Image (cartoon, helix red, strand yellow):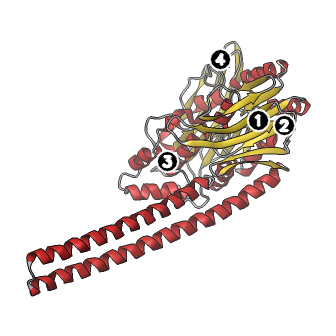
Amino acid sequence: MSTASLLEAHAVTIETPGGRTLVRELSLRLGREHVAVIGRNGVGKSTMLEVLAERRAATQGRIVCRGRRLLVPQYLPGEVAADDDPAASPGERRRQLLEAAFDAHPDLLLLDEPTSDLDGTGITWLVQRLALWRGGLLVVSHDRRLLRTFRRFFVVAESGCRYVEGTFDDLLADLAREREESDRRYLGEINRLVAKEEHNAAVRRRRQRKKNVGRIRELKRCPARIKLNDKRSYKQESQGKRAVLQKDRIAAARDAVKASRRALPVALSLEIALPRLPDGPAAPVISCEAVTAVAGERRLFSALSLDLSRDRIAVCGPNGSGKTTLLEIALGLRRPVSGRTRCDTSRVGYIAQDAANWRMDESLTELMATQLATASPETVAQILRVHRFPLALADRPLATLSPGERVRAALICLTRREPPPELLVLDEPTQHLDFVGLAALEAILAAWPGGLLVVSHDAEFLDAIGVSRRLDL
């Protein structure tokens, strides 16, 4: 990178409060380059940005800054739910915050998920402003439209961090090849571990049989008890040493498997068995009749009528147009000013923005065990592995997961629910998803046999999931 550095990191190590290492001995120099930071959900990108801004202390190492820097965080100060403030929607507040950051003219601008809550017009505005920015820029983002404007990338992963130059699409292709190679290495480690455990189990059974036969022979010869005890003590001691060595070897093999798993980017599997819905025409799941909604003194929409069953409809519109309000009215979570709605909630699966309605004290493992009451813990773990969801995260309360991780966890629960939902209602489901999760989400929703009511500003995503109608507010 540039020799005239504005920011330097020297052997910086970052750990979570629980002691999990996010970044190990990171060293970098950043001048006036424009660099995008990418990586899967939960890998530590936001935490790294906070450490570089010195809003959070590093576990080890030091940060040197030679200019003015400004961090615009991922979450808005005093963030509220969409449409709660009639004066400014979250997208409008996000844009105000970004405009203030540009107007401050720092030497180095640090942006964490700056496209969050922005509509298409807002994202176009942001791309244009960043193209004109002459200071240093470090951006954490999953937005494909924004990332395609970059040529420098910093990839954050469990296996290590690295700097890459080139186009975003070329980088995605490289990451896909790396995932395939990591999968092969991981499967190889698993196969070797299983073979070793099967071999050790056979050895233990053979030794137990010999031990039992030996005891019978010893008793028949009736040797002196002290001699018999000496022999038994020697055998137990030598076998104990061998058992310890075997245990250490197995533990080493397990550690190798865990290390390989940590290096694997997490992805939703494309092979999950999607639910089968009843055949024949379905009665409407949601009906809206002449619905009108307002925010403060502003009318959002009037006399809107809509019937939904297994349709695929996208709700689009600028920030503050009432997209989330429409979803909440349709679901019966908010009352309209006029008109009426009917919703069969037993046939609906709902994921709010940032999966806020899934902020629970229960873990994904606990929820799955409740849903699959007759299933064993091994079955639950197998489902999680099919989805490539980290088992360590599955045992954490959903409230502690990142928004992208929580969206994925909610999707797993909904796909395994009995009876399955006939209509999925999703409010900005791609907002915090990494590329692996986004690609898998697109494939799963494209194959989803039920209906979709989706709020999204991502036209590429809506095309990929086969939206048949768009409702513009």
**Where is residue 152, by image quadrant?**
top right
Give the CA separation, mark 3 to mark 4: 37 Å
**Between discs 3 and 4, the one toward the N terminus:** 4
| Local secondary structure at mark 1 | strand
Tell me the residue at 9%/76% (across/down): 225
Task: Give the labeled residue for mark 2.
Answer: 34
Residue at (67% x, 49% y) in the render: 160
Of callouts 3 and 1, the N-terminal one: 1
Quarter of the image for residue 130 reads top right
Q: Are marks 1 and 2 in contact (CB under 8 Å)?
A: yes
Picture coordinates of residue 176, whole percent (x, y): 72, 58
| Residue drawn where x is 48% and y is 68% of the image | 193
Count all numbered tags in the image, as a single digit: 4
Numbered tag placed on residue 107 in the rendering: none
Name the residue carrying label 1: 139
Nearer the observer, 270 or 165 = 165
Check the image and report above or below for 407 versus 191: above
Amino acid identity at mark 4: Asp
Say what amino acid the circle numbered 2 marks. His
For discs 4 and 2, the disc positioned in front in the rendered view: 2
- The residue type indicated by label 3 comes to Ala
Badge 3 density bin: few <14, some 14–19, many ≥20, Cα 10 Å: few
Which of 158 and 375 lies nearest the eye of the viewer?
A: 158
Residue 85 shows which numbered tag?
4
**Tags 3 and 4 touching, CB below 8 Å:** no
User: Visible in this render: residue 120?
Assistant: no
314 relative to 392 in the view: left or right:
right
Residue at the image point whose x is 51% and y is 45% from the top: 393
Mark nearer the viewer, 1 or 4: 1
Disc number placed over residue 392 in the picture, else none:
3
Structural crowding at the residue carrying mark 2, measured as other residues with C-alpha within 10 Å and reported as few (<14), some (14–19) or many (≥20): many
